[in-house]
Amino acid sequence: MTAWVDLHLHSSCSDGTETPTELVARAVSSGAAAIALTDHDTVKGVHEAQEAADAAGLGFLTGTEISAGFDGREIHIVGLGINVKENALTSLLDELVEMRRNRIQTICKRLRAVGVLAETPTSWEEDNTVSIGRMHVAVTLYKTGKSRTVQQAFDRYLNRGCPAYVPKQLPPAGKVIEGIHAAGGLAFIAHPGLGRWLLKKMPQLLTLPFDGLEAWHPSHTPSILKQIIAIAKERNLLLSGGSDCHGNVKGEGVSLGRIKTPALFFHHICETLAGGATPEKGFSVIPEQK
């Protein structure tokens, strides 16, 4: 089998179920050649993951998945190869984490007002090392019997139009890209085929200085994958991909290894970060998708 990588993974430092070390161990046992840890709006787990990957001989890229606003909607931007100590980026992430906490506090307040959430603060509400989000609330509602599944918690209480829905505050996409570039990283549009809206907005999105597109993702059908690759080739953009694994947070089992991004594109990203690659390299050897 062709060597493969997974460059979109989440740990317990955001809304995944496994620690960075556990995630690295699972990647090794799954046969990955390299990974990137891309927790939501945080880099707190990167150092631990880097150490574990180095010890295991696993290729590794620093990363994060940052929420951003574009044309009145939320998009996600994956930053790869970032310096996690760069001030512009860390300041932006600190701002985003505070926005997340304010949002979750409001959501919890609304849930407590209707008697759905216990008055006693949960452990994650008081844990400043975790980038908290709606997933933490949904899991708590499921575990306390307020919903039959984690997804039902979203559908009943947390999604748009529901009793505890609170809009997310978002920095402009351009500001996020600037932060990633200031940290020496590359900015990728995450899962552009998810919901189809992003693909329709691609001409406008790509007026911003993105470096690449996430092509391999669980939400992408073979036809969408082909379309994304064609856009990247036409515009001389890099390609990335990954499973977007959150562990078994929704009970579907760990998906690391479900999506196999050809390792060639990991090496191409690394070469680009080092200043020695041309983006058109590699398109001709993309394997046919079944």
Image (tube, rainbow, N blue to C red):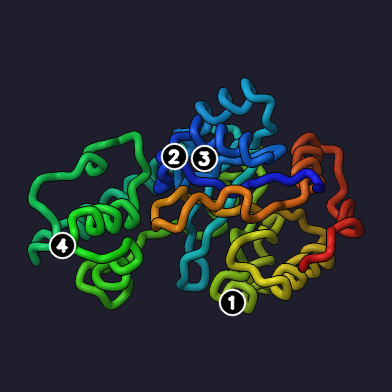
Identify the residue at horizontal 68%, vertical 66% (top origin): 207
The x and y percentages for residue 152 are: 30, 69
User: Foreground: 99 or 233?
Assistant: 233
Q: Amino acid at mark 3?
A: Leu
Instruction: Give the labeled residue for mark 3.
Output: 89
Q: CA distance from mark 4 to mark 1?
A: 32 Å
Q: Nearer the viewer, mark 1 or mark 2?
A: 2
The x and y percentages for residue 182 are: 61, 40
Instruction: Give the labeled residue for mark 1.
Output: 196
Tell which circle, 4 or 1, labels the residue nearer the N-terminal end: 4
Q: Nearer the viewer, mark 1 or mark 3?
A: 1
Which type of secondary structure does the marked residue at label 2 adopt?
loop
Q: Badge 4: how crowded within 10 Å, few (<14), some, or many (20+)?
A: many
Q: Nearer the viewer, mark 2 or mark 4?
A: 2
State whether residue 141 is above or below residue 7.
below
The C terminus sits in image quarter: bottom right
Instruction: Give the labeled residue for mark 4.
Output: 111
Q: Badge 3: how crowded within 10 Å, few (<14), some, or many (20+)?
A: many
State whether residue 209 is above or below residue 123.
below
Q: Amino acid at mark 1?
A: Arg
Q: CA distance from mark 1 to mark 2?
A: 30 Å
